[in-house]
């Protein structure tokens, strides 16, 4: 067998593999370029509330629709959220020291590392809320509904000592919603 024939037998299959590989890479690049050129900017909603790092001490947010609002790391000492819809809100690292949350709907909200000391949560709804590493020291929780909320066990045990009342909207007792014994 001649050397020229051996080269053809070795390199012809490699050329076919190389051609297929380059075709696949080319298609991937074309698809990627198409996706990038077709990308559209995200448009913020007009009613989006974002008070991240806000200085909101003693502000009046009572009876407002703040659903999905972002209050991350905001200082909301003694702020008034009475009767407001702040479901799906984000309050991560927020300070709600002495805040008025009477009858507020905080369903499905994220309250991670929030200070709610001395806050008034009378008749508040915190169904499906996540309140990990959140403090409720001396907070008024009469009639609050914490059904399916994720709260640290220690905080639950402290709240069970003073839990009483039934939420007028959901009809669930505070003790039952916290799983008090």
Image: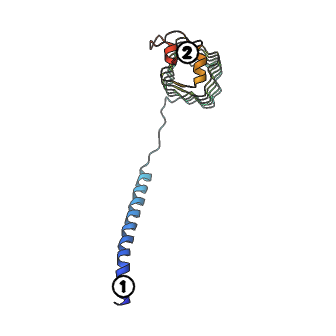
Toward the front, the furthest residue is 181
User: Dividing the image into 4 quarters, which one contains the N terminus?
Assistant: bottom left
Q: How is the image coloured?
A: rainbow
Total labels drawn: 2
Q: Badge 2 local density, few (<14 within 10 Å), some, or many (20+)?
A: many
Residue 62 has which mark? none
User: Is 24 placed above or below 133 here?
Assistant: below
Position in image of residue 27 (x %, y %): 38, 61
Q: Nearer the viewer, residue 51 or 10?
A: 10
- Give the mark toward the camera: 1 or 2: 1
Which SS class for mark 2?
Answer: loop
User: Is 42 placed above or below 110 here?
Assistant: below
Q: In this figure, which residue is indicated by the disc labeled 2?
A: 82
Q: Badge 1 local density, few (<14 within 10 Å), some, or many (20+)?
A: few
Q: Residue at x 47, y 10 (%)?
A: 168
User: Is 100 placed above or below 55 here?
Assistant: above
Which SS class for mark 1?
Answer: helix
Position in image of residue 17 (x %, y %): 37, 70
Position in image of residue 152 (x %, y %): 58, 25
Marks 1 and 2 close (CB-CB < 8 Å): no
Ranked by sequence position, the earlier of labels 1 and 2 is: 1
Q: Nearer the viewer, residue 42 or 92?
A: 92
Asked if residue 60 shows in the view, the reply is: no
Asked if residue 148 shows in the view, the reply is: yes
Residue 6 has which mark? 1
Alpha carbon distance from label 1 to label 2: 86 Å
């Amino acid at each position: 067998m001649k050397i020229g024939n051996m080269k053809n037998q070795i390199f012809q299959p490699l050329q076919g593999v190389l051609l297929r590989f380059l075709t696949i890479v080319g298609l991937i690049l074309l698809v990627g370029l198409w996706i990038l050129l077709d990308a559209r900017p995200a448009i913020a909603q007009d009613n989006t509330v974002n008070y991240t790092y806000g200085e909101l001490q003693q502000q009046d947010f009572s009876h407002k629709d703040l659903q999905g609002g972002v209050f991350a790391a905001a200082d909301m000492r003694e702020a008034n959220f009475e009767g407001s819809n702040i479901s799906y809100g984000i309050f991560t690292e927020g300070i709600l020291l002495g805040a008025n949350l009477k009858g507020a709907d905080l369903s499905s909200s994220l309250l991670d590392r929030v200070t709610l000391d001395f806050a008034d949560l009378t008749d508040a709804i915190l169904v499906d809320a996540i309140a990990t590493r959140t403090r409720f020291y001396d907070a008024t929780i009469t009639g609050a509904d914490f059904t399916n909320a994720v709260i640290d066990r220690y905080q639950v045990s402290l709240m069970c000592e003073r839990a009483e009342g039934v939420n007028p909207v959901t009809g669930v007792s505070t003790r039952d919603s916290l799983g008090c014994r």
